[in-house]
Image (tube, rainbow, N blue to C red):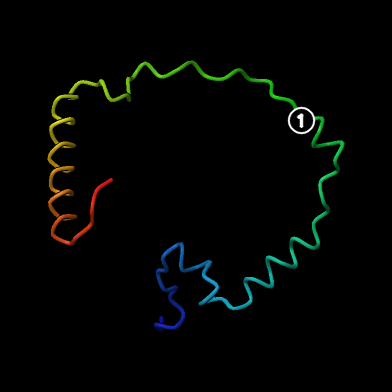
Amino acid sequence: MSLLSQPRPVHPRERLSLFTHSTLGHDVSAALKASSPLDISRTKAIQETLEAPPPSPVDFGRNGFHSHQHQAAEEQWAAARRRLDEEVGIVGA
């Protein structure tokens, strides 16, 4: 089997790239023009039939398990940022 007949592995994003497939933009444009637009009465008839899921039992707030560690890290970051700003000559508000 020759090397030309074997498919070359292609990254999924590369396959749809406008740089590698110059006609892709024209193909998408033609497909959108050929498709029928949604009827406004159909879009108004769509109703939600499912309720929202219950809230997550996991607390993603600032008062979580390691809040004291996060606070210390934030204070260290803020102090380092202030030092860097002072070196560069930026005055804090």
Q: Is residue 20 above or below residue 88?
A: below
Quadrant position of residue 66: top left
Residue under the point 62% across and 71% down: 24
Asked whether 80 or 38 is in front, the reply is 80
Q: Name the residue under label 1.
A: 46
Quadrant position of residue 93: top left
Q: Percent position (x, y) of residue 27?
A: 69, 69
Asked whether 8 or 29 is in front, the reply is 29
Q: Percent position (x, y) of residue 67?
A: 19, 24
Horizontal side of residue 77 vs 27, given as left or right:
left
Q: In this view, does 5 lie above or below 57?
A: below
Q: Is residue 67 above or below residue 3?
A: above
Residue under the point 13% across and 32% down: 72
Q: Quadrant of the N terminus?
A: bottom left
Q: Is residue 70 above or below residue 77?
A: above
Q: Percent position (x, y) of residue 42?
A: 83, 36
- At label 1, the amino acid type is Ile
